[in-house]
Amino acid sequence: MVNRKFLGLLCDLDGTLADSEPLHCQAWLDTLSEEFGIHYDAHWFEQWIGTSDKVLARHEVEVDGLPITVEELIAKKQKRYHDAVATDGRTFTGVDEALGRVVAAGFPLAIATNSGRKDADVMIAAARLERFTPISVTASDVEHMKPAPDIYLLAAERLGLPADQCIAIEDSGPGGEAARAAGCYLIGLTDKVKGADERMDDNAGAILRALELLERVPAPRG
């Protein structure tokens, strides 16, 4: 039984609120194939879910010896990703309604993502997530990205709350590790999230479960 008082909700973006991982994947596959003749598939991309463009780009430049800088490679991928988001950027089914219920109940919400600021802002705008919160923390805003706790700690701080009074929802291993390290109560969406306090397979259902926990009054001690 959960007997803690929770006051805020922190949500990952890609794969949690937004159905954007396939767009990131295709942007990377197309960039590497069309620009450099390197052919990977979606299975290869799975290992990078929850990390950042910088981590993946650095690996490709160093391991595959690409004749380009990390920053230039990221820019090529981002162009393809942003074009895709403009036409196909959306939240998962039921997420908008669930977030609306959280906001209507008066609980503060922040987005906590390992995406860089440019990618995050493009998706937030396309999915109209600013309807629910003006607060987002990205990998560009901290020194150490997930799996370090920095993104979640800063997101909680911007809500004016300690992280241990926040619920986090995550779909990736690095994200779950970051949320746990920050002290959040963690709802995991996939098997990649190790040590979650709860597991939900449905993205909207996880948000509604978080709302249940937010509305719960802890039993008196003693």
Image (tube, helix red, strand yellow):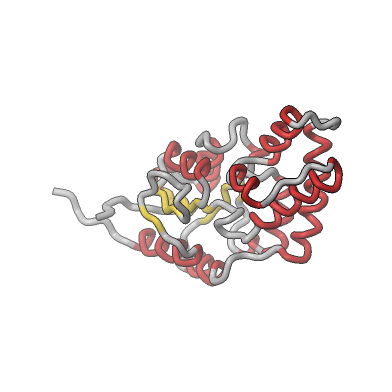
Residue 77 x/y as whole percent? 79, 46
Q: Is residue 71 left or right of residue 168?
A: right
Q: In this view, does 2 lie to the left or right of 144?
A: left
Q: Which residue lies furthest to the left in this view?
A: 222
State the residue in front, 187 or 23. 23
Regarding residue 120, the answer to whether it shows in the image is no
State the residue in front, 82 or 218. 82
Residue 212 x/y as whole percent? 37, 64
Q: Which residue is drawn at 53% across and 65% down?
A: 99
Quarter-of-image position of residue 164? top left
Q: How many labels does the image show?
A: 0
Q: Is residue 121 left or right of residue 79?
A: left
Q: Which residue is drawn at 66% across and 57% down?
A: 22
Residue 62 x/y as whole percent? 74, 27
Residue 9 x/y as whole percent? 47, 54
Q: Residue at x 44, y 36 (%)?
A: 181
Regarding residue 212, the answer to whether it shows in the image is yes
Name the quarter where the N terminus is drawn. bottom left
Q: Residue at x 59, y 58 (%)?
A: 133
Quarter-of-image position of residue 48? top right
